[in-house]
Amino acid sequence: MTDCIKGDDHLRETTLGRTELLNGHFLHVVRDAVRLPSGRDATREYVLHPGAVMVIGLLDDGQLVLERQYRHPMQRVMIEFPAGKLDAGEGSLACARRELLEETGYSAREWAFAGRLAPTIAYSNELIDIWFARGLSLGERRLDDGEFLDVITATPAQLNDWCRCGEVVDGKTLVGALWLLQVQQGAWALEWSTDPEPPLADNSRHEGS
């Protein structure tokens, strides 16, 4: 991918080698040896991530599909847009369709790719694709074993209030609320399709930086 801003070679680090620290059920942690722009050597520890999706589901009555789920690291129940990791070899749109159905029971007639966010750039290479979905029809959820969550609905105004007062602190959901607001105000356009072109594969999400 071409850089949007040129002339940043004086900021780049060169990867010299990699040591695997943890390859668990959920997390894959590595330590890279790097050469700094100054010529000195250093190390960078971070999480390798396969990529993920988030779905902003729009109901016909204008409400949004959200979830309430307990997040152990935060020790609290969080309000979030439906989201999940890509399976091996899975495309972004296929993952969005699967996660929406599995977690909420909804299927969508139309989809629109909005953008991409990097939620934790200091310690992970995770990238999350943002999808909008509409023309929703409700079926049966297919939660994973050990997965517990409530599906709720809210108006965009309610979501904005929750973001403002700190009820919603999840980073990806805050970005989703921003995207939704810009779309509703006509500032950012979406291209809706029954079978949209998925975003181009970004191999950097699987590599060290």
Image (spheres, helix red, strand yellow):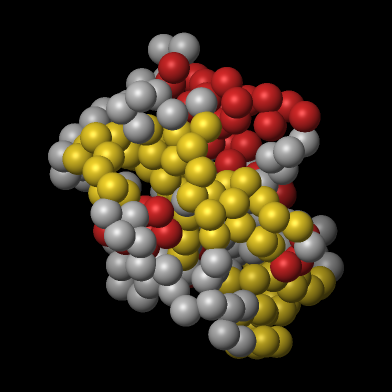
Total labels: the figure holds 0
Q: Residue 36 location, x and y as percent?
A: 77, 62
- Residue occupying image coordinates x 37% and y 33%: 58
Report which quarter residue 157 is drawn in: top right
Q: Is residue 192 visible?
A: yes
Q: In the rendered view, does 154 fall on the left or right side of 10?
A: left
**Of 118 and 130, which appears nearest the observer?**
130
**Of 168 and 122, which appears nearest the observer?**
168
Instruction: Name the image quarter holding the C terminus.
Output: bottom right
Q: Is residue 13 visible?
A: no
Q: Residue 35 location, x and y as percent?
A: 73, 68
**Of 45 and 10, which appears nearest the observer?**
45
Residue furthest to the left: 194
Is 111 above or below relative to 29? above
- Residue occupying image coordinates x 54% and y 60%: 149
Q: Residue 1 location, x and y as percent?
A: 42, 49
Q: Residue 159 location, x and y as percent?
A: 60, 30
- Residue occupying image coordinates x 69% and y 70%: 46
Is 32 above or below relative to 122? below
**Of 33 and 162, which appears nearest the observer?**
162
